[in-house]
Image (cartoon, grey):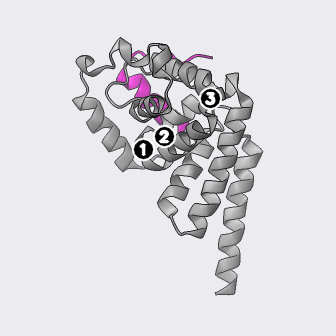
Amino acid sequence: SSLNLQNRDQMHLLCILISPRLNRSLEAAFEKIMRRRRRSDSFDDDDFRFKRDRTEPDTIESLIYRIGFKDLSNIERDIGELASVILADIPKNGESLLKVLSNCVKNVPERILIYATLVGLLNLKNRSFVGQLIELLQRDLKDAIRSASFEDAKYIVLLLSISVNCYTVQQASILGLYENFAEVTLDAGRSS
């Protein structure tokens, strides 16, 4: 089903419903950003036009990084159009798109709900691409834990957790991940 977000209050409610464990500082940052937003800040219609020359990886990378940056009033449309652009470019630049999306999860965590929604929408049209993205995120999670990059690990786990709501990740899989974390923590506590 399609989201119909008419105003900032609905977007805020969506954020709370999707991830009830968002910390207060994230909610405060969201409110601060929303107060600064104006209708004139919205993306121009040209930002997401389907032009043949706009499917280069750096242009799509820019669109992915900027989604939700200026205005959330048209976020449903923006996510849908960005998903269409990405889907059209997957055959040509799939590997680079996977890396960009993975990097966005780690580098732009304030838009993680938007990226989870985008990934859920992509999953409806191209399950194999999203499967590759989830596998890449799993590898990135292992690497982040091995290298003690716990901020990156936290954001990857957050995206995977939110992705349960988009039916991109199965509930049993995320619960298994949490159980593994708990077992490792308990084992470390017993051995020390």
Earlier-in-chain disc, 1 versus 3: 3
Instruction: Give neighbour class at mark 2: few <14, some 14-19, many 20+ (Cα, 10 Å).
Output: some
Label 3: state its secondary structure. Answer: helix
Report how far apart the C-alphas of labels 2 and 3 lie in the structure: 25 Å
Task: Magenta stretch: give its range.
Answer: 1-20
> In the image, is 129 to the left or to the right of 4?
right
Which numbered disc, 2 or 3, marks the residue closer to the eye?
3
Mark 1 sits on what residue?
A: 108
Quadrant location of the C terminus in the rendered image? bottom right
Residue 71: image x %, image y %?
33, 24
Q: Are the residues at dot 2 and dot 1 in contact (C-beta closer than 8 Å)? A: yes
Q: Is residue 2 magenta?
A: yes
Quadrant location of the N terminus in the rendered image? top right
Q: Write the residue at 55% across / 48% down.
A: 158
The label on residue 85 is: none
| Residue sitting farthest toward the bottom | 192
Residue type indicated by callout 1 = Val
- Front-most of residues 68 and 88: 88
Q: Are the residues at dot 2 and dot 3 in contact (C-beta closer than 8 Å)? A: no
- Number of marks present in the image shown: 3
Q: Write the residue at 45% across / 34% down.
A: 58
Residue 39: image x %, image y %?
26, 17
Instruction: Evaluate whether residue 168 shows in this view.
Output: no
Residue type indicated by callout 3 = Lys
Q: Write the residue at 55% across / 30% down.
A: 117
The label on residue 112 is: 2
Mark 3 sits on what residue?
A: 92
- Front-most of residues 47 and 164: 47
Instruction: Give neighbour class at mark 1: few <14, some 14-19, many 20+ (Cα, 10 Å).
Output: few
> In the image, is 181 to the left or to the right of 55?
right
Residue type indicated by callout 2 = Ile
